[in-house]
Amino acid sequence: MAKAPQNAISPTREVDYPEWYQQVIKAADLAEVSPVRGCMVIKPWGWGIWENMQHVLDGMFKDTGHENAYFPLFIPMSFLEKEAEHVEGFAKECAVVTHHRLEPGPDGGLVPAGKLDEPLIVRPTSETIIGAMYAKWVQSYRDLPILINQWANVVRWELRTRMFLRTAEFLWQEGHTAHATKEEALAETRQMLEVYADFAENYMAMPVIKGEKPTWERFPGADMTVSIESMMQDRKALQAGTSHFLGQNFSKAQEIKFQSAEGTEEFAWTTSWGVSTRLVGGLIMTHSDDDGLVLPPRLAPKHVVILPIYRNDEEKATVLAYCQDLETKLKDQVYDRSGVRVMIDDRDLRGGEKTWYHIKRGVPIRVEVGPRDVASGSVFVGRRDQGPKEKKGIPVEQFVAEIAATLKEIQDGLFEKAKKLRDENSRVIDSTEELAKWFTPKKGGDKPEIHGGFAYVHLADVPEVEEELKKLKLTARCIPLEGEDEPGKCLFTGQDVARRMVVAKAY
């Protein structure tokens, strides 16, 4: 007789990490592939996670003085052509609208009929269209700064897609600001990077490295790009957020000019910054295990699920009344500045089936309540950060009183676990031989074992280095902003460099 599988997700992370990722999304019912090529349908549980991310980030943006607005989905092609480096960077990913009307065709189908005078680009990002509006709004230094954020969808015509991580259409926020001085714009760029790092570490429980991108990794048209980089459980890097100092490049292209306090005509200094639904993918890959999704409580759609257990109508009435009272008491408790999010799952399913349903969806705390628990004034509790069988009975009043502390313990524990993984798989490397060896899997083929991690390497910010890294299938993630300078020689060119770069395989 075949041995029953020990995990809810097959294959496991060790066997096939990319397929494991897809199966976690399916088991947790987060999203599924849509009929539209490269696009996904985000289902209610997945949307609940993104919605919580939006809510937190939106508050952080407003706390730093930003306002929300909305700009058109379509961008005239001529707008992109004004900034040569920008259009070159996005040209291959652009979806283009060329017609505005459908008519019956000769074979009974529909054919595009009304050709547009100028093609429209479905926004891959909004610097150019927003810049055109800022040019209208800015006349004097008194009109600055402009601090605007937009929640929107964008389209980048990806050939190889993966749900949440890389899709043809995805959701994001994009901040766009204009300032009177270079110093203000640089301060804005760094401030928003700190906001992203705060969110990633304190809400997503995902440790990050803050750093500056080398020249070849900059946002097209930017003078400087800074990012937060995180290690996933397969030891690959994920760029989780970026902030760009655009200098005066877009201002000059879009004519964003103002009269200074001294009476001279100046071009504004601009920034842009954004995170996307890619964060949901990062959340999955940072914490989840071979039984499904694991969610940090601060972003979980529900903190607690109550599972009533009974055999007849009499027991049902007693148990449900107990569960409803427990639900009320839990909702009255404060966690993360709001009430605890609770649900009762009284569906007509077997107990084990319901339990595993919520394990796979990553609910932080499961509470089983049966007639014996009612009689003893207790609850039977399982935590998602522990094994499925690690459950224990707790007096109900104690459970309620400690719920906020328990959720904080889970949140903090997930961060420490992820940080430990990153630290154990980061190393300083000082030779090309060691670099190649560490990033070469022992098992070849399409499904190599999990290997590598973050390498801290002396590299020069020159094109030759990018080409050498490509040969090793590596990318330069960033030059860390924190820590001391450590001068050394570039591994590939021998040039003097002041700080090490983080190098990794990446998504």
Image (cartoon, rainbow, N blue to C red):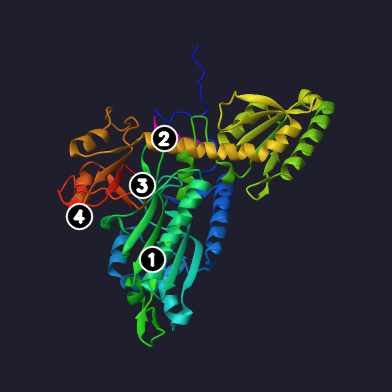
Callout 2: SS = helix
- Label 2 near label 1: C-beta < 8 Å? no
Q: Residue at x 74, y 45 (%)?
A: 332
Q: CA distance from mark 4 to mark 3?
A: 26 Å
Q: In the displayed image of the protein, which residue is found farthest to the bottom?
A: 263
**In this rendering, is residue 254 above or below 48?**
below
* Whole-percent x, y for residue 387 in the image: 56, 26
Measured as percent of width and height from the top left, residue 404 is found at 65, 41
Q: Earlier in the sequence, mark 2 or mark 4?
A: 2
Q: Tell me the distance, in whole angstroms, between the alpha carbons under discs 1 and 2.
A: 33 Å
Q: Residues within 10 Å of mark 3 (few under 14, many from 20)?
A: few
Using a 10 Å C-alpha cutoff, classify the residue at mark 2 as few (fewer than 14 neighbours), some (14 to 19) or many (20 or more). Answer: some
Image: magenta residue range: 16-24
> Which badge, 2 or 3, is on the more N-terminal residue?
3
**In x, y percent, where is residue 460?**
21, 52
Q: Disc 4 residue type?
A: Pro
Q: Is residue 68 above or below residue 473?
A: below
Residue 463 numbered tag: 4
